[in-house]
Amino acid sequence: MEHRLSQRIRLTHSARITSSSGRTGVAQLQELSASGARLRTLLRLPDLAFVRVEFKLRRGSQETMHTVDAVVVRRVSGGIAIEWSEFLPAAVQELLHMPRDQSPPPARRREEHSIVHRSPPICTKRMHQRRTH
């Protein structure tokens, strides 16, 4: 039997995950509670990995980026389950109380599960000069 400290809600909300080792991936928040969340992602992370979850919240016409620290507690079908580093972070509280029709649209299906790696820019000044002359 599962014992929960808070109620879990289902939603679809785009997010980005960054692990403490620097691996970054696109995710979708699918279930959310005051103590944690379930995210759909292809990013493979071990249990107990520290992660940072970033997501946008919209109030009227203004969008703001929020960051919440968490720990991977287990791998689940299609993603991971995380526990927030602090109980009910302010950004999570705001997301829990946000009307569902104001959630940013989910990422396009093709991009939804792709793993993103940060790499240095390829184009240098010299390469750019060759193309323009």
Image: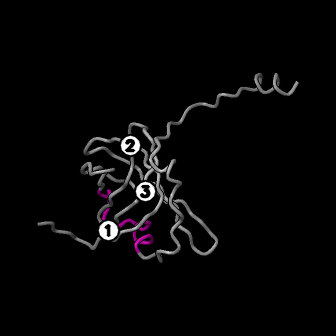
Left or right of 80 in this view: 12: right
Depth check, mark 1 against mark 2: the one in front is 2
The count of marks equals: 3
Q: Residues within 10 Å of mark 3 (few under 14, many from 20)?
A: many
The x, y position of residue 39, in whole percent, is 36, 55
Picture layout, residue 99 above or below residue 85: below
Task: Name the residue beneath numbered marker 2.
Answer: 43
> Mark 2 or mark 3: which comes first in sequence?
3
> Mark 1 or mark 2: which comes first in sequence?
1
Depth check: give the residue in front, 58 or 75: 75
> Do the CB atoms of the residues marked 2 and 3 lie less than 8 Å apart?
no
Residue at the extreme right of the image, as rendered: 133
Task: Name the residue beneath numbered marker 1.
Answer: 34
Magenta range is 83-96
Q: Residue at the location (40% across, 67% down)?
A: 11
- The amino acid type found where label 3 is placed reads Gln
